[in-house]
Amino acid sequence: MISATRIRLSALAVLLCMASIGQAAHAATLLIAASKAGPVRVERVAEGLDVPWSLAFLPDGRMLVSERAGRLRLVGTDGAVSPPLAGVPAVYVRGQGGLLDVVVSPDFAADGLIFFSFSERTPDGVRTAVARARLEVDHQRLAQVKEIFAQRDDPDGRHHFGSRLVVARDGTLFVTLGERYTQRDKAQDLASHLGKVVRIRPDGSVPADNPFVGRKGAQPEIWSYGHRNVQGAALNPRTGQLWTHEHGPQGGDEVNIDRAGANYGWPVITYGREYVTGFAIGEGTTRPDITPPVHRWTPSIAPSGMAFYSGKLFPVWQGSLFVGSLKFGMLSRLSLDGDRVVGEERLLEELGHRIRDVRQGPDGALYVLDETDGQILRLSPAR
């Protein structure tokens, strides 16, 4: 007797296969790129997006894309882009602020929930906030929208909002928060949410095992601190640990393994340099109580988006970490040996477009958001 669960899984497999076929049928090949995995076909699967910021896959293969201007769109497996979804709350859109990351609940098929981050105006300034909503796909709208987290600090300004969202294996939600540029010293202040990674439950409550729960003067949501502007985060599928990357100024972009209670140094211990003078920032590059990065870039590549690859289309890429570059217009593939970065390969340099996000698709292909031309690109083997 075949169980209902197996029937549902079989149906989902058929849907994903159809999604893959649909995307391949409607995609336009932009180029064949060289790589250590062999030639890579780079296809446009959707276009017409306005500064796309984040990409998330629904169980049926459709994509949910945030646009920084405050719009959320559904992209069909045929590449069709929906009108803006109704129900998105008011978003502060200025400079680096706007509608930022979006992720889908691991139980989306049952609960229909999504989470998204955005910059939010307050009477005194601006802050990064996170909301939860039920996505009504057929009606192309959000329902039951509820803000579940907002930074305690709300300075004015247009820079360094973060913000990436990652659902951990235990169902908690990691949120990365920038230090808002002019407030960089607050990254070392546990009374502030600036320059932190926080960890909350899906309803916004604080997990009892967060590292600073019960510590006087510390915000209980804080998971780690000493960050500048974290715009890439992903779980290592091998270990379940959170990895992040953050922007340095002229140098010192970092990839970190984000551990509970750890201090990552900004702006005291850093490889970064001041924009105008070029002088070193802080007191040095190492200190015993500061967790060092596992990889760094100098000069800065302006990293954004992060994904571990575990698919079958590219066996050579399995276990690699992919990071987009806004400044150099390329996709960085970092080779790993356990928790060590042992090599880098730079892809899509011939395209030269700002890569804002990177995700592995349900079909095993790699998908990137091209911010320059407002399109979604699919990377697959060129056979």
Image: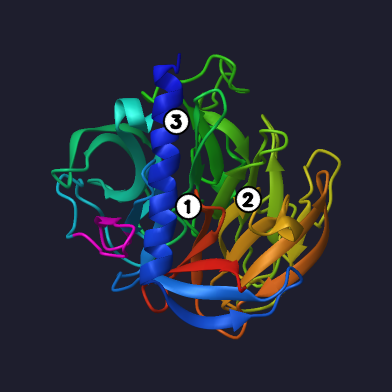
Which secondary structure class fits the magenta region best? Answer: loop
Q: Amino acid at mark 2?
A: Gly
Element at label 1: loop
The N terminus - image quarter: top left
Looking at the picture, does residue 241 appear above or below residue 317? above
Queried whether the magenta region covers residue 69, the answer comes back as yes
Mark number displayed over residue 297: none
| Mark with earlier residue (3, 2) | 3
Residue at 18%, 51% (x, y): give it: 85
Contact (CB < 8 A) between labels 1 and 3?
no
Q: Nearer the observer, disc 3 or disc 2? A: 3
Q: Horizontal and vertical percent for residue 154?
A: 36, 46
Residue 105 in view: no
**What residue is shown with label 3?**
9
**What residue is shown with label 2?**
311
Q: Nearer the observer, disc 1 or disc 3? A: 3
Question: Image quadrant of residue 54?
Answer: bottom left
**What residue is shown with label 1?**
162
Q: Horizontal and vertical percent for residue 97?
A: 35, 59
Q: Amino acid at mark 3?
A: Leu
Magenta segment, which residues?
A: 67-82
